[in-house]
Amino acid sequence: MARHIYILLLILFSSLGSLAQVGNAQGQIQIKGSVKGKENYAPISGVRVSTDKGAFTTTNALGEFVIRASVGDILMVEGPELETVRYRIKSGEDVDVLVEGYYGGVSKKQKREAISSRSFLADHQRFLDSANVYKKTNLEKSIDFIARSMEPLGSSGNKTEFSASLRTLGEIYMFHEQYDLAITNFKDALAAQESNKTKIHLGRAYVLNGNYESAISILEPLVTVRNMVPYQRIELFEALGDANKELNKLKDAQGYYQQGLLIAEKNQISPKEIDLNSKIADVFASEDRVIEAEGFYQNSLNLSKEVAPERLIQESEKVADFYNQKSRYNDEIQLRKRNLDELKQMSRASVATRGLGINTRDTITSQRINYKIANAYIAQDKLEEAIPYLEKSIVEADKDDDLVVQKDATRKLSEVYGYKGDYGKALASYQDYVAVVDSLYVRKEQEISRAARFNREIANTQNRISSLEQERELSQSKYSLAVTEQQLYEETSKRQKWIIYSLIFGIALMALTAFLYYRSNRQQKLANNLLALKSLRTQMNPHFIFNALNSVNTYIAKSDERSANRFLSEFSVLMRSVLENSEEDFIPLAKELELLELYVKLEHSRFSDKFDYEIDVDKKIDVDAFQIPPMLLQPYIENAIWHGLRYREEKGCLKIKVRQITDDMLEICIEDDGIGRKRSAELKTTNQKKQKSKGMGNIKKRIQILNDMYKNRVDVSIADLNKDQTGTRVSLKLKKQ
């Protein structure tokens, strides 16, 4: 159900609270708020609240949230039943989000049940919050809190809360590198309720577990999902990039990293900007594109300076490792020495890299940096410079009880003394190395024993969670049986609706049949018109040929062989053009005028003593923009010559004029000063009067069909030229296509 949200901003200017918030070392303030129903202020739990800088939390059972952000950050509130709200933080005010119609369409009894379950929801969210608190420090405790959060869910059957518990459990396992268990719980969370967030976590777990193909298959469909939180979309592209990089699909990996970087830059999520710049640099380094890699590494370093000193050291160490791979030992040594200076200004505690998992190999400490500096000197055969750094590494590792680094540094120091030929010191260092190895072996045995006990505890807790899940499934089955009766009632209602829908469908089908019948008739009419046009055109050509052959016969009768030959030659050119255009409804006006000029020339060669002719086309007219039916004007010109000008005692004149009336219409006039239509009709023989002109009849039919098909494109009118009924004027108006 769509929800409409109104934000009520209650700005509380508390001097004590403001001073505490502004005094934060990182420039962040603590934003408090709530998400509740507008009508009765009922709290809404599980609503996601995040900032564009990556901070994230959810509302508790009372609908309240607390999140740390900076002035100018964008606060986003979103949930499955809410329209996403974005608000720019201007100060340390409280933000209350009121959701209109949260209880819309719910009965009073259901409202009372929802209010009575508020205590249960509060307990569930409290247990999840406690699990997250102990996630990094006490795995056993955090898992126990997850189990306690799931215990009351068996009876309630609440999929949202159950999925949230399983997802949180998967996050805990993933943090402690128990990837198989994390994957199992993420899958169970998805089975309970679909969630983009859970799918992204599952994809990342697959990547960390080395199952890259599965990661891509679960993550790629999310690329097209809309309305995803920017931080989640960045995590999506980052995980896809990691999976493709491990599969050696470096171009695909780089593409995903670049997309994630664009979103991070747009939303100013600095931590992810650093991560993605660094990972893009790693891809370029894998392709041996040193210049591009150095550029992106430099970007990550510049961004790290603005975030935190420990992050700068972390990125600097990655760049130093890059220098080491490229045998740029001087650059490596210089950078690591600078990191040592930074570490001295910070606490003696180790500065661990951010990410998932607790892995001592990823921990940045002064003893590890000193050890790497010594290795860089050794790679250059500068053994004297390496010795002090190895000794510092051993001392600091012993102080911090870091047996792994102490072991490696002691063994390397023994080797360096051996290279120098100082075998006494080499032996002493080797003996120290053996002692450290023995201590490390004892510690490893203890860790293995603790890990075995720890794994048994995890298995027991996981079995407890699995049994809770089974109880919930059983409760869901009982609930399903309870609603079967309601479903049967709804099924009866559906059948009645189907009958109504069937009737509506039948009416719609009848309407569609009528429409198809109407369209079929129109198509049949069009086909008939086309057939009629073709028939009329085939009649026009023999009529024209018959009249032209009469002209040739006249020359032959006069024994004028030369004129007959010339006439036949020009006539053949005309006939070829006429036959080429005989299948077309319309041809360019320019081509029709060329044919008319050739035809008039032929007739003039026969009746040169009877008339002169003139063809006048306005030069402003774009003749190529107009089209005309072929052989439409020829019968009118033929009538003007044969029935008008031929009977004059004096020499007459035939004029063909083309003028533009409007932008999309022109007029073609055929004028002759012949004897006129009345006098011509009187001179006809009795047989001629009985027979109507076939050419003129065909023309009228063609114009009628063409106007029916093309919406009155051609209009023809015939009138006497003079008041004494002599001469004839034919006016043809033609529209553009």
Image: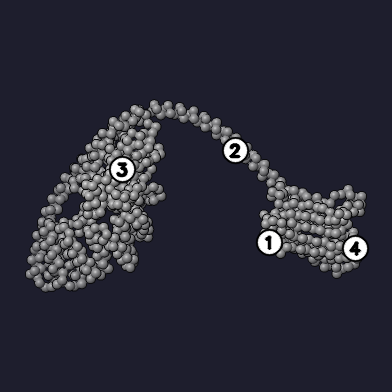
Callout 2 environment at 10 Å: few (<14), some (14 to 19), or many (20+)? few
The amino acid type of the residue labelled 3 equals: Leu
In the picture of the structure, the residue carrying the numbered disc 1 is 622
Callouts 4 and 2 close, C-beta under 8 Å: no
Q: Distance between the residues labelled 2 and 1?
A: 45 Å
Q: Position of residue 57 (x, y in %)?
A: 28, 45
Q: Distance between the residues labelled 4 and 2?
A: 68 Å
Foreground: 65 or 442? 65
Q: Dot 4: what SS?
A: loop
Sequence-earlier tag: 1 or 4: 1
The amino acid type of the residue labelled 1 equals: Asp
The amino acid type of the residue labelled 2 equals: Leu
In the picture of the structure, the residue carrying the numbered disc 4 is 650
In this view of the protein, can residue 222 be seen by the observer? yes
Q: Nearer the viewer, mark 1 or mark 3?
A: 3
Q: Position of residue 239 (x, y in %)?
A: 32, 53
In the picture of the structure, the residue carrying the numbered disc 2 is 512
In this view of the protein, can residue 288 be seen by the observer? no
